[in-house]
Amino acid sequence: MSLLLSLHLQRGEFCLDIDTAIPSTGITAICGPSGSGKTSLLRCIAGLDTAPSGMVQFAGQDWQTERSILKTEQRGIGLVFQDAQLFPHLSVMGNLDYARKRQFKKEGPSNEEVCDWLQITPLLNRRVDKLSGGERKRVAIARALLRHPQLLLMDEPLSGLHDSAREHMLDVLQGLPKHLDIPVLYVSHSFHEISRLADHVILIEKGQLIAEGDLISLSTRLDLPLSHQQGAGAVLSAQLCDHDLDYGLSTLDVDADHQLTVNYLSAEPGQALRLFVAARDVSISLDAPQHSSIMNILPCTIDTIESHSARSTNAQLTIRLRLNEQFLLARITHKSCDRLQLREGQQVFAQIKTVALINEYGLAQ
Amino acid sequence: MSQNDWLAIVLTLKLAGLSTLILLAIGTPLAWWLANTRIRFKPILEATIALPLVLPPTVLGFYLLIAFAPNSAIAQLWQYLTGDTLAFSFSALVIASVIYSLPFVVQPLQSGFQQLPKPFLETAASLGSGPIDRFFSVILPLCRSNFLVASTLGFAHTVGEFGVVLMIGGNIPGQTQVISIALYERVESLQYDTAHWLAGGLILFSLLVLSLVYLFNGYRGLTAPSNNGEASK
């Protein structure tokens, strides 16, 4: 059960050409620079645009074939637009009721539950033009959820929010997967958002699919743009191992051979966690430093060294380091790379300055 | 005021009410289509609908008179279908009013539909709302003021119609004699006191209706000429 796509759309200079299957669980991010066709792709899936030759199939049901097209209203989707699109002639409650009266699936979260998740209960009697940007977006998401859709589509739902509202929304969105058992497609160009929310990633550029896979492997691939973004880094999945209450620390298992020590986390041992290690917080050493204040020093293998970074314009390059199944990124200078004579396949030690906890839900596999 | 004056008032209201209903029924889908179509001869269609705005009513009346003449195809078809003659009948007045007032209904609606943000309709569709549901749950409430303006202008313009009725309706009390014609006849026969009642009454009525519209509508969109300008762009 998943979403199968084969879409070919020509619009002037722009050509969308996507063939893929999107997993039936978790959040799949559609990621790419603006103008890459993310929104066009989402609109084709929603049935708002039609690729003249194409196929869309969801959970074995034909949404678009060569001969027939299922209308948007019959696809059972929830759609959240960039700018919320709340109906101005209805109150917040009226907007939610609009979806509730047209539910796709009988079973699903109740009005109270959805309002609670999105923290909009105090807003119910407001007029929609009296809401802040973040509030509008939360109401729009609640409305889409109350439709009880079988697929949730979100088009840059955090665009236009200032930083604190965006972080709040990310917290809210991160909590959603544990409540929902439907696939979510999340369009965004922000690596920050994707690293916090997505399980799977589809990267598109100029209308073409350039890579797809789970976030952990794609975030560290040096041939893809994610690893070159400002603030790039590795997403890791780990399990809480133990607490050290004397020092206020927690230890995490990355895999059988690698452990990380971080500030105390209020989680149970065994709980899956998602971590983020920024490339600029990782340095490389040829032997294990004995007298370092850095706690997290992991043995690893150099997987790839970025080859095509011009020294004259950029003093730094990115190196991909292999733990067992997962990867780290390290951003070091060309000079250090030459001095240490680093080469692919070499055994080194990664010194990690900071580990950030992304969320407490792990990654859907 | 004589019985004929009262007959003229009732007839006028009946004609305007019926015409407005027909105009909304025809004008709504027509305006929706015009607002969304991309066919090449759209400007010609829009110009055709707008013709009654610029032509002297007598021109339209002249051609309708010919079209409704007993030996014309239209009149014969009408007689075949209904068993009545078309010339100098109330039905002929309704048909003429609908044609004559069409731009006053289509243009405000078309301009409303054109300004309606598409994403609202797309959102409604994504929430499971089909085309008819969308019309009543999104389009109608969001274009409420345009419908109010369209109905009022359609109604008021039919009440104020003179030239076309004079050409095709004749002057049969209770059948085709509307207020404007009755007024003309009273003036011709120098019955100025009755004429005052009819003329003053029309002024008061029009002022009342338009004030109510301005009151409910704020002020947006009622000025037909500027709306026309936008709609025919």
Image: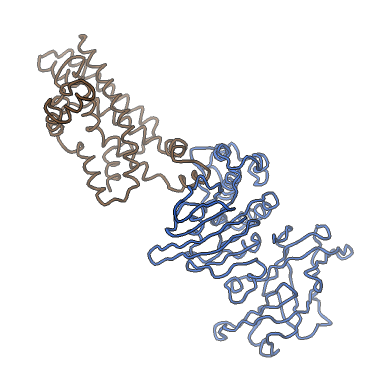
Asked which quadrant contains residue B95, the reply is top left
Q: Does A359 sit above or below residue B65?
A: below
Residue at (11% x, 27% y) in the render: B71
Q: In this view, does A287 lie to the left or right of A183?
A: right
Q: Residue A167: x percent and y percent?
A: 64, 57
Question: Which chain gets the brown colouring?
Answer: B
Q: Does A108 sit above or below residue A269?
A: above
Asked which quadrant contains residue B80, the reply is top left
Q: Residue A80: x percent and y percent?
A: 55, 50
Residue at (35% x, 30% y) in the render: B213
Q: Does B106 sit above or below residue B39?
A: above
For the residue pair B151 and B71, the one nearer the viewer reads as B71
Q: In this view, does B197 lie to the left or right of A257?
A: left
Q: Does A4 sit above or below residue A223?
A: above
Chain A pictured colour: blue
Residue at (50% x, 61% y) in the render: A6
Q: Is residue B154 left or right of residue B142?
A: left
Q: Among all residues in the image, which is located at the extreme left?
A: B189
The quadrant of the image that shows the C terminus of chain A is bottom right
The quadrant of the image that shows the N terminus of chain A is bottom right
Q: Residue A100: x percent and y percent?
A: 58, 38
For the residue pair A328 and A62, the one nearer the viewer reads as A62
